[in-house]
């Protein structure tokens, strides 16, 4: 089975409250996912989201989302959107293709919650450049 | 009535060739593509008048397909000589649709997903007739209950795979690092610590089964499946899968402990565990020995857990194939519209092509999953070249009964000519049988009475007798990103 690894980061400054993670499967395909916070599996909510914590508990934490994607539609392209409710980060997107002859793929997405804003942190909106004063 | 010279030997030869062709194509194209056969209903074939049926069955579109039709059964040569290439452009590039959009598409999504282009050729004496067709379905129906059931089964298998995958990763990390740190602050850490302090089968079973369950129940099915798949169906399948996996883990631990791992230990710790009299017996040495044996056992339990993972992976592949199989036919109300034109091209002068006819038709259909019966209607307008005869208006219906590998259908078409309102309605009545020989081998036979065509010297209509087969080249086209 094809294995894809990917990572993103989110500054805790962009965490607004309780953080809930969910995955949207695109490309007319389907699949399942599970979430670990610092190595511990987290049980899902009834609505299909997974609560991973708050700004306080997530500072420096690493969230691993392991997803298996199954090819259903007649195209080999797939896309996974990692939606981070309760933050200004994301959605983080992974795009890839299924291998020929194998209709399944595993994607490991790691999201690090950084205590300080770094260049890799996802920014909710682009800052407009200020025009220099004349 | 025309006497058929249908020789079994000739048919067998044709069949052998027909299966050889896809194998050769398969061998020449690295990486191998998936062959996927579908019924040979192609708009471009229809306009050429060589399709086994005049009323097409609405099918789930494929990205790219190749159709070949054999000659009529009374011909000397049964090698396929009619070819069609069918392409659905939507599936050749990435899309943002979810499984829900695919299972129950809106009108707009239906139009995009089902738009199909087809190109077909057939030899006519020293010329070649070329047909070009476009088809689309504003209403493409919805996925079947069997399709939804297959998706539910797949979700349960996904949970098996993800749980086993997580357990293998954890055990590997613990065994390699000889530390319980990968467990972090998990409530199961004291359970495994108990096993490290005093290795025994029950403690290990307890840890493995509880951790597996923790991982298994943390798996979330695709949120887009809500409204498609019955959550109770997934829950029931997951319950069974979890119980089976926990039993397998228990058996694996029992087997491991039955095959005494102590002989593989060497040195003073092994001597201690083997009760060698001169071995150190202080509590620290004993604890160290127990810890070593516990981590050794954890390493040895990885292969049986990895076996759970690989068996889930195999089951997942089979389950996806089942999903594809159940995705062939959509249910409920459907409407297909198509247009096509045909030209005749002299073999020695491509620029001397001449338009023969063009046609436009609409096919409302209803397919019932409970009784596996579908009814398809058609109205078709055919504009013909003066040389070919007057313009035609066709109307009719087709009833299809699916029974296992076989689809039997009866098709009736009435035809009137525009030029002569007093001209009688002529009919075409055929019986069609589509049979799936093996998983990816599909043959179709059509037999019956054709339209009357006085201009072609058939005042009462001739016999329709067609043997055909279809080859899907790939539903996963290799298109660069």
Image (cartoon, rainbow, N blue to C red):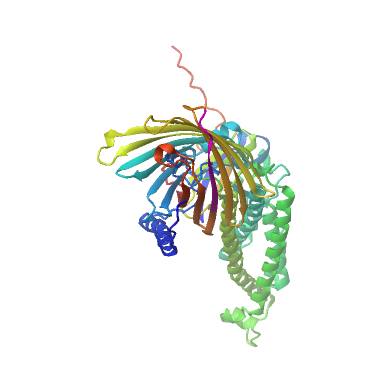
Residue B168 rendering spot, x and y as whole percentages = 59, 62
Question: Is residue B431 on the magenta stretch?
Answer: yes
> With B255 as the anchor, is B176 left or right in this view?
left
> With A87 as the anchor, is B127 left or right in this view?
left
Question: Is residue B377 on the magenta stretch?
Answer: no
**Seen from this angle, which residue lies furthest left?**
B348
Position of the C terminus of chain B, as image quadrant, is top left
Q: Nearer the viewer, residue B73 or B456?
A: B456
Q: Nearer the viewer, residue B384 or B278?
A: B384
Q: Is residue B165 above or below residue B285?
A: above
Quarter of the figure with residue B4: bottom left
Q: Which residues are magenta?
A: B422-433
Quarter of the figure with residue B131: top left
Residue B178 rendering spot, x and y as whole percentages = 59, 65
Magenta highlight: main SS: strand
Residue B429 rendering spot, x and y as whole percentages = 54, 45
Q: Nearer the viewer, residue B259 or B351?
A: B351
Residue B363 visible in the current orientation:
yes
Residue B211 visible in the current orientation:
no
Q: Is residue B221 above or below residue A133?
A: below
Quarter of the figure with residue B342: top left
């Amino acid at each position: 089975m094809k294995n894809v690894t990917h990572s993103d980061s989110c500054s805790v400054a962009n965490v607004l409250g309780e953080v809930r993670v969910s995955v949207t499967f695109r490309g007319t395909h389907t699949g399942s996912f599970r979430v670990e916070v610092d190595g511990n599996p987290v049980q899902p909510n009834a609505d299909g989201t997974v609560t991973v914590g708050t700004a306080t508990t997530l500072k420096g934490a690493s969230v691993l989302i392991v997803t298996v994607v199954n090819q259903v539609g007649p195209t080999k392209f797939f896309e996974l959107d990692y939606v981070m409710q309760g933050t200004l980060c994301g959605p983080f997107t992974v795009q890839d293709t299924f291998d020929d002859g194998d209709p399944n793929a595993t994607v490991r997405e790691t999201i690090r919650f950084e205590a300080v804003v770094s260049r890799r942190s996802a920014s909710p909106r682009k800052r407009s450049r200020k025009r220099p004063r004349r | 009535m025309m006497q058929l010279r249908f020789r079994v030997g000739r048919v067998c030869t044709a069949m052998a060739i027909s299966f050889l062709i896809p194998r050769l194509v398969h061998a020449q194209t690295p990486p191998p593509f998936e062959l996927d056969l579908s019924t040979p209903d192609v708009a471009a074939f229809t306009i050429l008048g060589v399709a086994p049926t005049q009323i097409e069955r609405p099918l789930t579109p494929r990205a790219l397909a190749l159709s070949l039709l054999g000659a009529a059964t009374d011909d000397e040569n049964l090698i396929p000589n009619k070819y069609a290439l069918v392409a659905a452009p939507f599936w050749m590039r990435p899309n943002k649709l979810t499984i829900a959009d695919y299972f129950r598409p809106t009108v707009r999504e239906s139009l995009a997903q089902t738009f199909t282009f087809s190109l077909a050729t057939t030899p006519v004496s020293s010329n070649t007739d070329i047909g070009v067709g476009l088809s689309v379905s504003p209403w493409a129906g919805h996925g079947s209950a069997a399709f939804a059931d297959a998706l539910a089964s797949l979700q349960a298998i996904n949970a098996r795979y993800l749980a086993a995958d997580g357990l293998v990763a954890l055990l590997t990390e613990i065994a390699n690092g000889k530390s319980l740190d990968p467990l972090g602050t998990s409530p199961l850490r004291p359970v495994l610590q108990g096993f490290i302090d005093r290795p025994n089968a029950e403690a290990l079973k307890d840890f493995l089964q509880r951790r597996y369950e923790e991982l298994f129940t943390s798996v979330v099915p695709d949120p887009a499946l809500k409204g498609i798949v019955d959550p109770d169906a997934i829950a029931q399948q997951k319950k069974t899968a979890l119980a089976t996996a926990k039993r397998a883990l228990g058996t694996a631990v029992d087997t491991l402990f039955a095959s005494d791992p102590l002989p593989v230990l060497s040195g003073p710790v092994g001597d201690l565990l083997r009760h060698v009299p001169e071995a150190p017996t202080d509590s620290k040495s004993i604890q160290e020995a127990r810890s070593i044996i516990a981590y050794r056992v954890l390493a040895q339990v990885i292969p049986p857990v990895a076996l759970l993972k690989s068996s889930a992976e195999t089951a997942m592949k089979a389950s996806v194939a089942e999903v594809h199989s159940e995705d062939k036919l959509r249910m409920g109300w459907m409407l297909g519209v198509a247009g096509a034109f045909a030209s005749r091209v002299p073999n020695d002068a491509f620029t001397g092509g001449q338009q023969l006819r063009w046609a436009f038709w609409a096919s409302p259909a209803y397919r019932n999953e409970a009784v596996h019966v579908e009814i398809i209607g058609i109205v078709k307008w055919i504009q013909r070249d003066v040389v070919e005869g007057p313009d035609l208006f066709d109307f009719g219906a087709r009833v299809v009964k699916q029974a296992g590998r076989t689809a039997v259908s009866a098709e009736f078409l009435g035809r009137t000519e525009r030029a002569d309102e007093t001209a009688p309605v002529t009919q075409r009545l055929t019986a069609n049988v589509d049979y799936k020989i093996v998983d990816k081998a599909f043959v179709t036979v059509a037999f019956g009475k054709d339209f009357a065509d006085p201009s072609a010297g058939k005042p009462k209509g001739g016999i329709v007798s067609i043997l055909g087969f279809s080859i899907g080249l790939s539903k996963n086209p290799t298109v660069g990103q």
